[in-house]
Image (tube, rainbow, N blue to C red):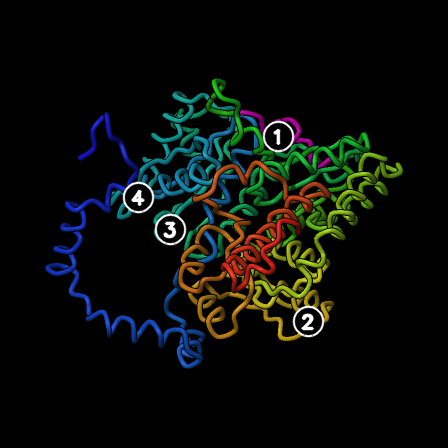
């Protein structure tokens, strides 16, 4: 029993005899498990090539999806605009999932509301929920904008968001001129990056007061995409500001999920709504995640007649391309500050190259992250043996294969549309030295013994990684540090046996 004098964590608490007795009783009376020998036999079979072929033939079920659902991306977009409340038209349980997902990753509160649709709404429609919900949200939290997205329930029954919002205006829930951008974000289609694109498109197009013929301002729009690294947002802004460029970051959630202690408020930072309304008047829009923002970028190109660029500032080559593009757009040479940062990165890459060269990796995550991270691995002489993207859009697989073709390594595989249970089969049949991915890879690490380097989204079981950058020269240095130090950790682990392997248990690496 817990007492004030002897408080222990769950890790130690559940090892106590009284808990072990409960677990034993539960297994015997309720779980109905096969024998331990049978479990071990089946477990061994799941590591075989025979099982791998059956696993790859699987169509009807996803196991350990390496993606999340659309409304999650919509919520991130909303919280990137000042004083904006994300509003999800659906059940309360869905919103609890979105809030907890972000809160566990960023270790910060996540404001988001729901109109709590229940069985009645599923039968008769959610109009009254929307009328009451918008009124309550507007009165209680006093946001300057409410961004509405949907969940499965609302989409399956076919609720009309445009009509519902207009009916809420007519009912007096919100003022007639109050901004309520809305986006259809069905959870059963696409992923969190699809929801990000749908909501960003909706906010920009529904807020915009810019005509196609408007004179363009000497200003750059930057869309970061679904960015789980607060430091990356700040790093990108630092690079652009080093050129003295006038810019708007559309969807800047860097302050919302990184407030100083003692200063919490419901909304913090974000793109100013007036800037969002005027974004169509900028001369160029850059997306840092092209596979996350295709619909939005098409709107900037077609509706607002802007130049559009797709840049991915992860790794040396990706950051070089981004810096060169800003230099060209501003007509200014690269500042010495950025040249020095690049030089430090190159120096660090030279120091670490011998330890990463030839090491094989399995990596998974979102499509744009993978393009940048795999490019960086190849720059370091590593071999990305298994590259898995569950939410791979059209064109991604071909681009990744072309990127892998630039490596001298052989047998590098691209797995589009596969999940982490597929990855488990790949790791047992064609093992690698290291894995790079999110928290859900810890089960793979336990099963296979392959070390996991936590990069991506979500990361629930480590603290503060989201505060760093993985973009820009300094972000590439962070990636390099995390990866090469895990390589050195493994080297120490493999060479620590006294009088057997410790001839290479060196204090100097």
Q: Residue at x 70, y 65 (%)?
A: 403
Quadrant for the N terminus in the image: top left
Give yes or no for residue 279 being in the magenta stretch: yes
Residue holding disc 3:
152
Magenta-colored stretch includes residue 18: no
- For the point 55% across and 49% down, the residue is 455
**In the depicted structure, whether residue 369 falls above or below residue 402:** above
Q: Label 3: state its secondary structure.
A: helix
Residues at badges 1 and 2 in contact (C-beta under 8 Å)?
A: no
Q: Secondary structure at mark 1?
A: loop
In terms of secondary structure, what is the magenta stretch mainly?
helix
The disc placed on residue 11 is 4
Q: Is residue 475 left or right of residue 121?
A: right
Q: Which mark is residue 409?
A: 2
**Residue 87 in sight here:** yes
- The Cα atoms of the two marked residues, 3 and 1, are separated by 29 Å
Q: Position of residue 250 (x, y in %)?
A: 64, 36
């Amino acid at each position: 029993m817990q007492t004030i004098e002897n408080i222990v964590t769950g890790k130690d608490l559940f090892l106590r005899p009284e808990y072990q007795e409960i677990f034993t009783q539960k297994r015997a009376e309720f779980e109905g498990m096969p024998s331990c020998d049978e479990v071990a036999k089946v477990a061994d079979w799941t590591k075989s090539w025979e099982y791998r072929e059956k696993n790859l033939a699987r169509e009807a079920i996803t196991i350990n999806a390496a993606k999340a659902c659309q409304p999650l991306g919509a919520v991130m977009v909303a919280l990137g605009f000042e004083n904006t409340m994300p509003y999800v038209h659906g059940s309360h349980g869905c919103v609890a999932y979105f809030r907890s997902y972000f809160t566990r990753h960023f270790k910060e509160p996540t404001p988001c509301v729901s109109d709590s649709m229940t069985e009645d709404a599923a039968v008769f429609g959610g109009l009254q929920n929307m009328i009451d919900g918008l009124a309550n949200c507007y009165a209680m939290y006093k946001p300057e904008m409410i961004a509405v997205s949907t969940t499965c329930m609302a989409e399956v029954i076919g609720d009309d968001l445009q009509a519902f919002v207009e009916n809420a205006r007519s009912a007096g829930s919100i003022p007639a001129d109050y901004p309520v951008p809305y986006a259809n974000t069905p959870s059963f289609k696409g992923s969190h990056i699809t929801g990000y694109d749908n909501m960003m498109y909706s906010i920009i197009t529904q807020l915009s007061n810019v005509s196609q013929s408007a004179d363009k301002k000497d200003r750059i729009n930057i869309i970061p995409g679904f960015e789980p690294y607060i430091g990356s947002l700040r790093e990108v802004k630092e690079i652009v500001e080093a050129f003295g460029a006038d810019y708007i970051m559309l969807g800047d959630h860097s302050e919302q999920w990184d407030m100083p202690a003692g200063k919490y408020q419901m909304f913090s930072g974000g793109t100013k709504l007036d800037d969002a309304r005027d974004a169509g008047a900028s001369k160029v829009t850059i997306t840092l995640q092209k596979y996350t923002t295709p619909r939005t970028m098409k709107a900037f190109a077609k509706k607002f007649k802007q130049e559009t660029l797709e840049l991915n500032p992860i790794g040396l080559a990706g950051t070089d391309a981004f810096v060169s593009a800003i230099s060209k757009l501003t007509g200014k040479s690269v500042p010495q500050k950025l040249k020095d940062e690049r030089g430090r990165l190159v120096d660090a890459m030279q120091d670490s190259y011998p330890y990463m060269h030839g090491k094989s990796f399995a990596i998974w995550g979102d499509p744009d992250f993978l393009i940048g991270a795999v490019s960086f691995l190849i720059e370091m002489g590593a071999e990305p043996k298994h590259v898995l993207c569950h939410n791979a859009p059209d064109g991604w697989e071909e681009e990744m294969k072309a990127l892998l073709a630039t490596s001298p390594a052989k047998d590098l595989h691209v797995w589009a549309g596969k999940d982490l249970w597929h990855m488990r089969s790949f790791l047992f049949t064609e093992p690698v030295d290291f894995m790079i991915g999110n928290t859900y890879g810890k089960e793979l690490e336990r099963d296979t013994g392959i070390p996991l380097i936590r990069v991506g989204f979500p990361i629930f079981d480590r603290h503060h990684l989201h505060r760093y950058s993985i973009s820009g020269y300094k972000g590439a240095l962070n990636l390099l540090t995390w990866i090469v130090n895990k390589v050195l950790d493994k080297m120490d682990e493999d060479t620590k046996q006294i009088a057997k392997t410790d001839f290479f248990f060196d204090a100097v690496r």
